[in-house]
Image: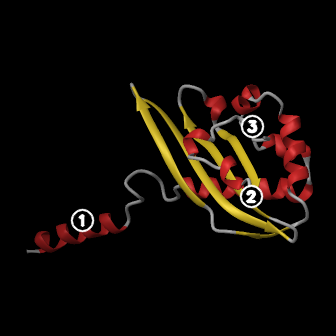
Amino acid sequence: MRKFILIPLLMIAMLLTSCGGGRGAVEITEGDTAEAKLEEVMHALKTKDRDAAKKLFSKQALADTEDIENGIDYLFSLVQGEVTEVGDLTWGSDEQIRYGVKERKIFSWCDFSTARQDYYLFMLIYDRDDKNPDNIGLYSLRVVAHDGNYAKHVTAWQDMQQPGIYAP
């Protein structure tokens, strides 16, 4: 009789003490990755730190961009004043697996404001690339002012995968 009570109790104890099915107790989500990168971007904007702005990007993005210095100049001149408000960050992801090789992109966007202007921010982040680890990190950053030309600069995320900083 004790065996019949002991076995179910042991099974319940094992289920209650499992740690996420072998994934570990802490799992970093795509949203966590996007939020962390947004904080880094906002810090670079606040401090106007060119080195911090460069360090935002993956090795591959820096290699693929035509002129990161021009992009940083554009970004710092576009965003006037201190950031006063950052809207909710929205994100999604796209994962591809080809012959066991995985690649995952996180695309995220939000609005933010300074005392002078409202802006839209888009980021494309590779958080996994088994084929090219140099891709891991921020690949694309697009910041545009909410003005009359806003719509021509913001399209589907698949069309905004330009390396580095978008500077029209």
> Tell me, what colour scheme is on the image?
secondary structure
Question: What type is the residue that disc 3 sits on?
Answer: Gly
Given contact means CB atoms under 8 Å apart, are the residues at marks 1 and 2 in contact?
no
Task: Label 3: state its secondary structure.
Answer: strand
Please tell me which residue lies in front, 124 or 137. Answer: 124
Regarding residue 28, the answer to whether it shows in the image is no
Earlier sequence position, callout 1 versus callout 2: 1
Residue depth check, mark 2 versus mark 3: number of the one nearer the observer: 2
- Quick one: SS at disc 2? loop
Q: Report the quarter where the N terminus lies.
A: bottom left
Q: Amino acid at mark 1?
A: Met
Judge whether residue 112 can be spotted in this image.
Answer: yes
Q: Classify the position of the C terminus by image quarter.
A: top right
Q: Which mark is residue 93?
A: none
Q: Quadrant location of residue 40?
A: bottom right
147 or 71: nearer the eye? Answer: 147
Label number found at residue 11: 1
Which x, y percent locates residue 146? 74, 61
Residue 127 position by quadrant: top right
Label 1 – label 2 distance at C-alpha:
63 Å
How many other residues sit within 10 Å of disc 1, few (<14), some (14-19) or many (≥20)? Answer: few
Write the residue at 66% across / 61% down.
Answer: 110
Q: How many marks?
A: 3
Task: Judge left or right: residue 115 versus residue 95.
Answer: right
Residue 153 drawn at (x, y percent): 69, 47
Q: Residue at x 78, y 67 (%)?
A: 113
Give the labeled residue for mark 2. Answer: 148
Sequence-wise, the earlier of marks 1 and 3 is 1
Q: Nearer the viewer, residue 157 or 147?
A: 147
- For this view, does 127 lie left or right of residue 65? left
Which residue bears the numbered disc 3?
A: 164
